[in-house]
Image: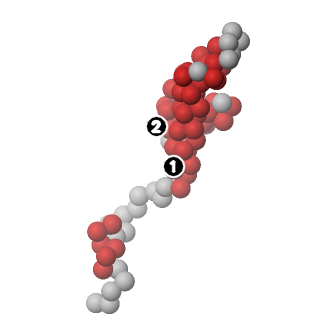
Amino acid sequence: MRHAVGMALSSQDLQTRNLAMIVVAASAGVVLHCLSFPAFATQVGLQFWFLLGALFGVERGRAHEMPPTEGLAHSDDFGSAGRSR
């Protein structure tokens, strides 16, 4: 969860930062429930792990995205890229 808080505070991408804030808010309640019963063994705990895992996947996916640039071939142009003209 510490990683999600770090993403919410320092991510350069606005959408990722907003998603991280939502996940931290939802996860904070689950962590507080641990004081009264084992929340991680319930449906709420499953939601906790799913949201944190999905947030990590979003971060990894965004890290590997290339920024859009002008002048590059579109995906439908790749079919002829290897052929001689």
Name the side, left or right, on which 26 lies relative to 81.
right
Q: Residue at x 56, y 49 (%)?
A: 60
Going by the numbered disc 1, the residue's amino acid type is Arg
Given residues 59 and 31, the one toward you in this image is 31
Going by the numbered disc 2, the residue's amino acid type is Gln
Locate residue 45: give its quadrant: top right
- Label 2 or label 1, whichever comes before in sequence order: 2
Q: Is residue 30 visible?
A: yes
| Crowding near the residue tagged with mark 2, few <14, some 14–19, many ≥20 C-alpha atoms within 10 Å | few
Whether residue 27 is situated above or below residue 73 in the rendered picture: above
Q: Position of residue 71 (x, y in %)?
A: 35, 68
Gap between marks 2 and 1 measured at Cα: 10 Å
Q: Residue at x 36, y 64 (%)?
A: 70
Q: Position of residue 33 (x, y in %)?
A: 64, 13
Q: How many marks?
A: 2
Secondary structure beneath dot 2 equals: helix
Locate residue 47: give its quadrant: top right
Residue lying furthest right in this view? 35
Which part of the image, by quadrant, shows the N terminus? top right
Which part of the image, by quadrant, shows the C terminus? bottom left
Residue lying furthest top in this view? 36
Contact check, label 2 and label 1, Cβ < 8 Å: no
Q: Which residue is mark 2?
A: 15
Locate residue 84: give its quadrant: bottom left
Q: Position of residue 58 (x, y in %)?
A: 51, 43
Name the side, left or right, on which 38 lies relative to 63.
right
Whether residue 46 is situated above or below residue 12 in the rendered picture: above
Q: Is residue 8 visible?
A: no
Q: Position of residue 83 (x, y in %)?
A: 33, 86
Residue lying furthest bottom in this view? 84
**Residue 62 disc label:** 1
